Image: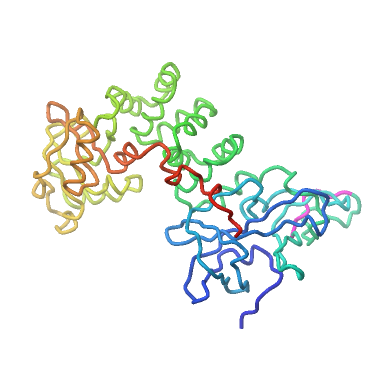
Amino acid sequence: MSTNLSKIFVARLIGLDVFDPMGDRLGRLRDVVVLLREGEPSLKTRPLVVGLVVEVLGKKRVFVPMTRVTSIDADQIISTGLVNLRRFEQRGAETLVVGELFDRTVVLLDGSGTATIEDVAIEKSNNRGDWLVSQLFVRRSEATGSLLRRRNQTLVVDWQDAADPSNAGPQPATQWIAQHEEDQAADIADELRDMPDKRKLEIAAELQDERLADVLEELPEEDQVFILTHLDNDRAVDLLGEMDPDDATDLLNELPEAEAERLLTMMEPEDAEDVRRLREYEEGTAGSLMTPVPIVLSPEATVAEALAHIRQEEIIPAAASAVLVCRPPLETPTGKYLGFVHTQRLLRYPPPEAIGNLIDRSIEPVSDQSSLADVARELATYDLTILPVVNDQQRLVGAVTIDDVLDALLPDDWRTYDDGTPVRKVGKRYE
């Protein structure tokens, strides 16, 4: 039988299901939000627990105020009232227990050395019913004084017996990355966007090239430029090579021409050639929006070969919706463009079938000089997620995907709400 708890360590809560009073599951607990208050450690200045970060459908993380939490036990958390489903964003003094306190180093005030925070206990106060941080579970990292105080010893200390962890510097970037390992690149970009510049660079330095490239593609242009220009040349070039050519082109177009050209000369010739070709197109044309490396096969290729290309992990869903069929050479610009085969149609035919027998010729490709408006109309008219792009010789030079068009059509501030206000500035969160 579950028992409503008045004190519990946060690590025990992470991953628990959160329910509404009717028993419907809202999501899963991912973090606890506290306010670190200034002053000498004492009962009065214990951090106030202000809410929970809950992961709801679609891996979106939302904020549930503690005033809405009616029960916390070892098996579940129950809240009451409506939950605001806007994406959670931190405000100024808010601190994430898992995301920022875990793995921080604190000084023990008894003079015995330093310790690393491994868990945090929260406790419900008797007088007002507020939840406060009461204790820290720590591992001693540096010992002084008595020989009995060994390094790596674990112990529980009261909050007031350790120096304020907010003065110990940020959580190591490696720990932050581990906590967000399963997040989508767009979600990591959302969090990076509001970090101080120094913290952005710390996270970028620890991310793998492929992961950072995916995140950069989701960031606003000013953040992309800031991060790229603060990396050493070799890392910057590696990142540009990992990015889709159209995204790398957009980023280089934001740099001074001399800087862009310098990086281009350092890139692998094949990657640089794709980018240089895209940079020749006027902004807003199909050529400037397209990727020059869609899935291109000859008509003799089989259904099995086509599906093998589609299954490649690096192929985005929009680009995987169709295979483009051309005469050799198959690298863009290709031989004569013949048509394309929808992935759905490939699934209806046996593996040995030649894709040349399945070509859909009813959809005309667009010219590389077509306008953004013309491309958008074509995609909308025929319910497509990818559209082939040809030059004046009817050679395939690339393909425009629906995400490219949406990025170009949406306003620069599409990541904020309709009134342009970030979530953290809307209303009063704790009411």
Front residue of 187 and 244: 187
Q: Decide if residue 345 is on the left or right side of residue 175.
A: left
Q: Decide if residue 138 is on the left or right side of residue 302.
A: right
Q: Position of residue 292 (x, y in %)?
A: 27, 33
Is most of the magenta stretch helix, strand or loop?
strand
- Vertical placement of residue 71 versus 419, above or below: below
Q: Residue at x 72, y 62 (%)?
A: 132
What quarter of the picture does the N terminus occupy? bottom right
What quarter of the picture does the C terminus occupy? bottom right
Q: Decide if residue 110 is on the left or right side of residue 382.
A: right
Q: Magenta stretch: residue 143 in it?
A: yes
Q: Residue at x 76, y 62 (%)?
A: 134
Front residue of 250 and 312: 250
Front residue of 80 and 194: 80
Q: Position of residue 298 (x, y in %)?
A: 15, 40
View extreme (top): residue: 258
Q: Quadrant of residue 361?
A: top left
- Vertical placement of residue 194 versus 180, above or below: above
Q: Residue at x 18, y 50 (%)?
A: 342
All told, the count of numbered labels is 0
Q: Position of residue 25 (x, y in %)?
A: 48, 71
Q: Quadrant of residue 63?
A: bottom right
Q: Position of residue 279 (x, y in %)?
A: 31, 24
Bounds of the magenta segment: 137-144
